[in-house]
Image (tube, rainbow, N blue to C red):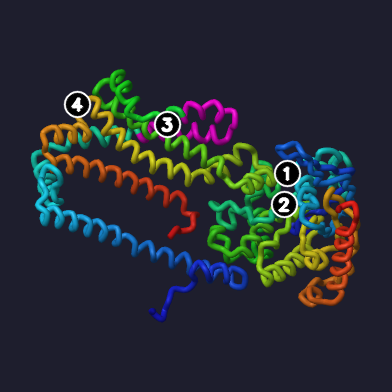
Amino acid sequence: MPTSEPQGSTGSESISSGSDPVEGTLSVSIWRRSIRRVRVPRAVISIVVGLAIWEAVVRMFDISSFALVPPSEIVREFRVVIEQGLLWEHLQISLHSLILGLSLSALIAIPLGLAAGTFRAMREYTDPWILALYATPMVAFAPLIIISLGFGVQAKTAVVAFACFFPIVINTTAGVRAVDKDLIEVGTAFKASHWESFRWIALPGAAPFIFAGLRLAVGRGVVGLVVADLFGARAGLGLFLLQSSQSFNISRVFVAASVLAILGVTFTFLIAQIERRTLRWRPADD
Amino acid sequence: MTDEHSNGQTGASVETHNLRRVFRDPTGSEFIALDDVNLTIGSGKFVSIVGPSGCGKTTLLRIVMGLDEATSGSVAVRSEGADDTKSATARRSFVFQRPALLPWRTVQQNVTFGLDTRAGRKIHPDRTSRSNHLENLLELTGLTRFRDYYPAQISGGMQQRANLARALAVDPNILLMDEPFSALDAMTKERLQRELASIVSHLEATVLFVTHDIREAVFLSDRIAVMATDPGRVVKVVDVDAPTERDAAFQHSDILTEQARAIWAMLDEQKKDPFSE
């Protein structure tokens, strides 16, 4: 064990909270931050090791290239796709739909969720629709949207928006309702108006839930991109994936899937960044 | 007048008339939290309410604050010197049992919460008086160093100081405190009790303090209202005999212990009371 152990674990935080309030808690937050710094490489190590195992297994057992291709093959195909410019249009269209669909969805779902969380009557009207539509598989709605809006960007955007809508609205509603009752009473005790209570207590209290909803929405939105393309599209990453699979180009299917994954991860990361900046007050989680 | 302003407002008297609060659970059975409570608290007094858990002491406090409504009966809060027509202006303020600080506001922003509201902006309308007031308050409660921290970054004791400072910020005529020190460790608790005694001694405000800690009640109060449970009612009001300065010596003195013991005996007697069996 190193002699200069970081001061103040979660244990000593509670011990020191009485007699020496700040020293303890301060060093805890510094210590936690340093853990965060160590974590990032672990994610990289995990991916690199995972890919290496994949590569090794495919080579060792001589697996058919129709079943599974090694990462090196996918990387090679990736380069081909980029050099021949096969990806750009699909990526552009999908990116466009994802950004627009997600924003549109958030713009409607967050206010609706806030209202539903605040007003009981509102919630009682909206809940049955939200729960029923949420429980229905998205694949059931996608063809309807495609038929009415065509094969263009609008339809894809609408499918993405539809897919993103539910996690956002459900989380936002739950977030408003989960705000600590004691904090609501602070508003009452100090004569905050309804609007002030909403702005200063309910909204910031619900914010972590809203961000969680947005992060979930990204995942569903990416699924929406693919689903929309399966029912007809002129361009899009889903179509690119579908065409690759129909021509038995397994490597290219993996390329398409990887791009979709990268898209999802990037958006989730961006939202997490915004969340961290917006919710600075939250104690660092470990 | 100016001096009074910097030290908060004048006190207010509180009078309850046949106050009754009945809770009904979902099955329809009733629980009488407060039954016919008549309590008169003089302006500027520090009055503690003690009693077994479930005797309605917190309910009483919440009704006085307006956080809960009485089933029947009434509460009159009158600020000193005001005639009946102006009685509505008596400003009440609440110190919560849990610190109940807004986690997204810094300590300072939490303290000023009551001044930020539309209603509270009138208390210190001009910038200088507001900022002087805030500085004094942070100094008084020992929070100056921690003003820019978020609640999650400070200890429970510091959080309770912020909770108190927030209540004092609005210059209350009456300060209602709901077991504010109950979750603290013994050492922090005693220190905060001494600090509260000293802060309150500079205030004109009336303090209504709910606690289950009888020594704490004796240490802090001018008077103690002893309550009994089922139905919740005030059984006795006791005057406390205390030195002018409530310091550590008094905290551990025999005078305090003796008075606490007398109140314990009162509470014990209630347990034997056939009415509550």
Give the amino acid type for the residue marked by disc 4 in the picture: Arg
Give the amino acid type for the residue marked by disc 2 in the picture: Phe
The residue pinned by badge 3 equals A134
Q: Is residue A126 magenta?
A: yes
Q: Are marks 2 and 4 in contact (CB under 8 Å)?
A: no
Mark 3 or mark 4, whichever is nearer to me: 3
Q: Classify residue B180 as left or right of residue A79.
A: right
In the image, are marks 3 and 2 on the same chain?
no
Mark 3 or mark 1, whichever is nearer to me: 3
Q: Are marks 2 and 1 in contact (CB under 8 Å)?
A: yes
Mark 3 or mark 2, whichever is nearer to me: 3
Instruction: Please tell me whether mark 3 sits on a helix, a strand or a loop.
Output: helix
Q: Please, which chain is the residue tagged with disc 2 on?
A: B
Q: Is residue A14 magenta?
A: no
The residue pinned by badge 4 equals A234
Residue B84 picture location, percent across and down: 88, 41
Q: Please, which chain is the residue tagged with disc 4 on?
A: A
The residue pinned by badge 2 equals B94
Of callouts 3 and 4, the N-terminal one: 3
Q: Please, which chain is the residue tagged with disc 3 on?
A: A
